[in-house]
Amino acid sequence: MRQIINHFTDDDLYKFTMCCAVIDNFPRAQVKYSFTDRDNTVYPDGFATAFMEQVRALEGLSITDDEIDFMRRRCDYIPGWFYNYLKGYRFDSRWVKAYQDGEGHLHIDIEGSWSDTILLEVKLLAIISELYYIMTGEHSRLDMKACYDRTYTKGRRLLEAGCVFSDFGTRRRASFEAEDTVVRALKDSSLAGGTEGKFVGSSNVYLAMKHDLIPVGTMAHEFICAIGGMYGPQMANHMAMNAWRNTFRGALGTYLYDSFGWDIFSMNFSEDFANLFKGLRIDSGDNYTQLMRIVEKYRSLGIDPRTKQVIFSNALDTDRAIEIQQYARHYCQPSFGIGTHFTNDFDGIKPMNIVIKLIAAKITESWTFYNDTCKLSEDEGKHTGKPEVIERFLQALHMEG
C-alpha cells in the first residue's frame, strides 16, 4: 500500500511549537497517549497491521532544508536551535503499539519521551482517517472537483461575512489530497478579493509551504494536561503560561484555556499573562457564554477586549462561524479555525470522530510511576480520561462531577 504521510512537516504547527517548549522546559519528561474512537467504529480486518506498516514508514522521514528555510522565514518566533534538533529527529515505530480486539475495534497506545512522541499524534490520526477510507473502498468516492467547488463557495461566504479564518483540518481529513484541495480552494477564494474577511493560512506546515501561506497555531490541550498530571491541575495553567513565556519571549500567540475549566484558568490568568498573550482560543462549551466570560475577564483587568483576539475552533461550520462573527466582532477580534468541515465534507462519507489524548506523564525517566491526567471539557459530559482520574481532578478543583 502507498505511503500516506510523505513529508516531515505534513503536521500541525502547534505540534512543533509545543515540542520546542517541551525540550526547553521539560526535557526529560515521559508520557503516555491513548487513542479513542468516539463512534466505536469497527475497523476492517487487518487494519491495525496496515496501520503499523504506515507507522514504520514514518521512520524514513526527515525534515528537508526547504522545510527548515520556510519555517525560519514564516515562524521567526521559533528559536534557531530547534531546527538542529529537527534535523536529527527520526520517528521510531517502537513508540507505538496497535491492535484490534475480537470485535474489530482499534486500540493504540503510545509511550516515550515527550519531546519524541509529541510529533506523532496528528500524523497518526491523519493516517487512520485516510487508511480507513482506503480499506473500506470509500476512498474512490472522494470527488476532488466537488470538494474544490464546495470549499471555494465556503471560502467566499466566510470572506464576504468579514471572517478571519484558517484551515485546521489535518487530523481528521479524508486524505492528504483532500486537504491540499481545500487549501488551494481557500487561497483561490481569497485571491478574488473585494471582501473584509481574510484567509490567514493553514495549521498544516507543509501545505502552508506548498501554497505560500502562513502556518498557524499555538498549542493544544496536551501541553497543559501533561503539566497538570505532573504537578496538579490547580497551577497547571500558570505553569504552562510561564513555560510558554520562557520559550517564546513575548511572541506567545493565543492561549488554549479550557483544559481544566474556565474557573481555575481565570484564577491563573493574571494581568501580566493577559497582556502578553495575543488572545484566547475557545474549543469547548457554548461559544457565546465562553466569549462573554473572556470579555468580562479582560475588562476586570482593565484591558479592552476589542484589542484581543478570540479564536473559535469548536466544531465549526460555515454557517456557525458567520453567525458568531456577527456577534463577536462587537466585543473582540474574532477569528476561526475550521477543521473537519473543510477537509472531510464529501457526499456519502462520514467523517471519523477520533482523538489521541495524553493520559499520563512523569517529569523524568527515572521515576518508577506515571501520574495520570485528564481533560475537563467545558462541554457537558465530554471530559476525557479515566473516570476515577476525572473525579479526582474535579475534586481538586472543587468542581462537581
Image: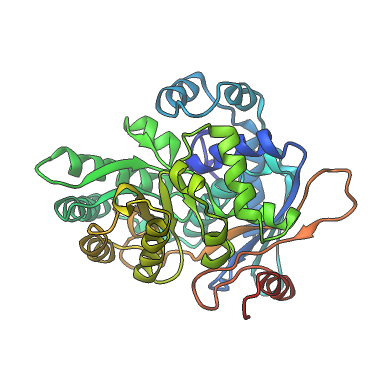
Quarter of the image with the C terminus is bottom right
Q: Position of residue 288 (x, y in %)?
A: 34, 69
Hey, which quadrant is residue 80 in on the image? top right
Q: Is residue 254 above or below residue 330?
A: above
x 55%, y 26%: residue: 63
Q: Position of residue 339 (x, y in %)?
A: 39, 55
Q: Position of residue 273 (x, y in %)?
A: 50, 46
x 41%, y 66%: residue: 293
Q: Is residue 181 above or below residue 342?
A: above
Residue extending furthest left?
Answer: 194
Q: Is residue 70 above or below residue 141?
A: above
Residue 391 horizontal side relative to residue 338, left or right: right
Q: Position of residue 268 (x, y in %)?
A: 57, 56
x 20%, y 50%: residue: 152
Quarter of the image with the N terminus is top right
**Residue in front for this viewpoint, 400 or 90:** 400
Residue 148 horizontal side relative to residue 60, left or right: left
